[in-house]
Amino acid sequence: MKLARDTGLVFGRYFGLFIRNPAWVALGVLQPVIYLVLFGPLLKSISSVQGFPPGGAYNVFVPGLLVQLGMFGAAGVGFSLIAELRAGVIERLRVTPVSRVALLLGRALRDMLSIVVQSLILILLSLPFGLSIHPIGVVITLGLIALIGLMTASIAYALALWARDENTYAPIIFTSTLPILLLSGVLLPLGLAPQWLRNVAALNPLSYAVDAARAVFRDHLSDPSVTKGVAIMLVLSIVAIAIGARSFGRAVA
Amino acid sequence: MEEVINTKGLRRVFKTRARAVEAVAGVDLHVRAGEIFGFLGPNGAGKTTTLRMLATLLPPSGGSATVAGCNLLTQPDRIRERIGYVGQAGGSDREITGRRELEFQGRLYGQSSAAARKRAAELITMLELEACADRKSGTYSGGQKRRLDIGLGLVHDPQLLFLDEPTTGLDPQSRARVWDEVRRMHDRGTTVFLTTHYLDEADALCDRVAIIDYGKIVAEGTPEELKRAVAGDVVTLAVAGDQQRALDLLEDQPFVREATLDEGSVLLYVDRGEVAMPAILRLLDGAGLTLMTIGLHRPSLDDVFLRQTGRSLRETAA
Ligand SMILES: Nc1ncnc2c1ncn2[C@@H]1O[C@H](COP(=O)(O)OP(=O)(O)O)[C@@H](O)[C@H]1O
Ligand SMILES: [Mg+2]
């Protein structure tokens, strides 16, 4: 099928660009390590605070870190696209018969893969520090993070194609991801938050992903919040892919 | 003769926050199979916009077009299979080697990986990129980069190739190489549609030329036809003091077809320069005007442009 073939080709191009650059690979591995080394030590003391949810400190924090990794890891992908716009690469690709969906999906899947690998590294590195998680939980979590990455990357590409310029893209992407992350309970569980903050968070689709991830890390794999979170992310990813592919089809100027 | 491109009233309006710009304002073009067609005009004339519409990258705001036998509005997919397009910025990624880029491009056109590899090797030989093919294109010279970009437009051996300002910014030697390349494509039967703001390029390289200004075609024909239509000869002169006085004196003379001021000199279009020159000298002398310089030349495409638009392409082209 043409879409699958084209997606594979585009994925191969961008995966190749990534894997041939040792700096990117090193940075990708280093990121989760930094999270653990610089953030992990704080966890010991904070888990004794009153009102802190049950479960080990790592089981409370790692799901949040993963969601953050999924979103921040994908939010910046538009920068490389803007450079390619400027070099005429995107026009050159768009003038070929390649599928427009593949132009988006091939790239976004590359971004998704690197996020999944980083997440896996983070989970594995946390195990010696007391994180405990069922293998099926790992699979569900990685699937969830993959969807967050896919969705965020697709939106980031659509935004970059619209903005066409780093100085427009950067402020929009940074000022929007931060509140979305904070309002999802990614840093501290929203159980600690006042009611109004919890009401706002209920409107934030990402908070359902965080809830789902937390439930998985509490070993509540059959909790309804897990299905709910995965379903919401799945639907949003499909919508985001449609938006992104449409942008590749009509990229003007 | 078969027409590879035919447009009727092609238009494109860009809406920005402040206002709407009509970048292409009703263009009728006829490009014949196998020719090198030049689209000549100053910066901002609408060349790139026209090209991008014809290459399916930008939807027209109005009008219709047939490109490579297909309807631009309803069959963009089929057009894409038949055309190559090399944009002003090129299109190769700095971080990727020329060979990888050529192979990838071939794959996008549906070639198997073996076929793409073979075609890339062919193009590397043809465009003399052997020395740099396995280096990242960011390390290429301007001429090498441009040849790679042209190669990317040729991987599927298109019947029609669009080149947007293929020689802008190149040194004279690289420029000559690109001209050779275009002529070789022409010899193989490929139709080449290129834009340029260089007069000599349009004159020397193109079989036919359309001149565009403010989104409208102001003249179309072979370079010879266009120049012949201007006048027999062009006399350029300057007098001491106000050029306007010389212009007033000379423009009503029966042997002067047309007269304009340009960059502080007077331009006269005359039928026969060798007859007009003595008469001009006598007239200026009689009016007490001191002649500073005088020259006679055959009309160039710039004279065509000047006559059609009242401006010189040399001034407007940046
Ligand atoms: N994406 C765009 N948005 C707004 N105006 C544009 C856009 N692209 C081109 N224009 C305007 O359209 C006109 C023609 O541009 P262009 O086709 O690039 O000219 P040329 O290639 O002949 O230099 C210019 O005035 C330019 O500013
Ligand atoms: Mg241009």
Image (cartoon, coloured by chain):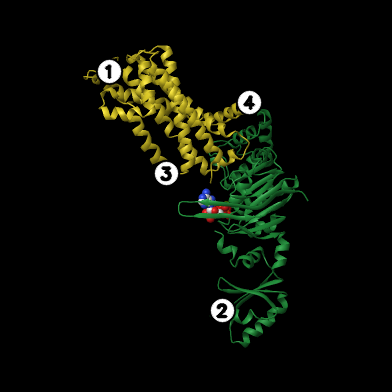
- Judged from the image, the secondary structure of the residue bearing numbered disc 4 is loop
Return the residue at label 4. Answer: A1
The label number, if any, that marks residue A168 in the structure image: 3
Q: Colour of chain A?
A: yellow
Check the residue under mark 4 and report the chain it is in: A
Q: Which of marks 1 and 3 is nearer the N terminus?
A: 1
Q: In this view, does B243 lie above or below A106?
A: below
| Pointers 1 and 3 within a single chain | yes
Return the residue at label 2. Answer: B244
Q: Could you tell me residue B314's position as x and y percent?
A: 58, 63
| Pointers 2 and 3 within a single chain | no
Check the residue under mark 3 and report the chain it is in: A
Which amino acid is tagged 3? Thr
- In this rendering, would A91 be left or right of A193? right
Q: Which of A169 and A122 is in front in this view?
A: A169
The label number, if any, that marks residue A53 in the structure image: 1
Q: Mark 1 near mark 3, Cβ–Cβ under 8 Å?
A: no
Q: Which label sits in the foreground, 1 or 3?
A: 1
Check the residue under mark 1 and report the chain it is in: A
Q: Which label sits in the foreground, 1 or 2?
A: 1
- Judged from the image, the secondary structure of the residue bearing numbered disc 1 is loop
Q: Could you tell me residue A201's position as x and y percent?
A: 33, 28
The label number, if any, that marks residue B226 in the structure image: none
Dot 3: few (<14), some (14–19), or many (≥20) neighbours within 10 Å? few
Q: Chain B is drawn in which colour?
A: green
Q: Quadrant of residue A30?
A: top left
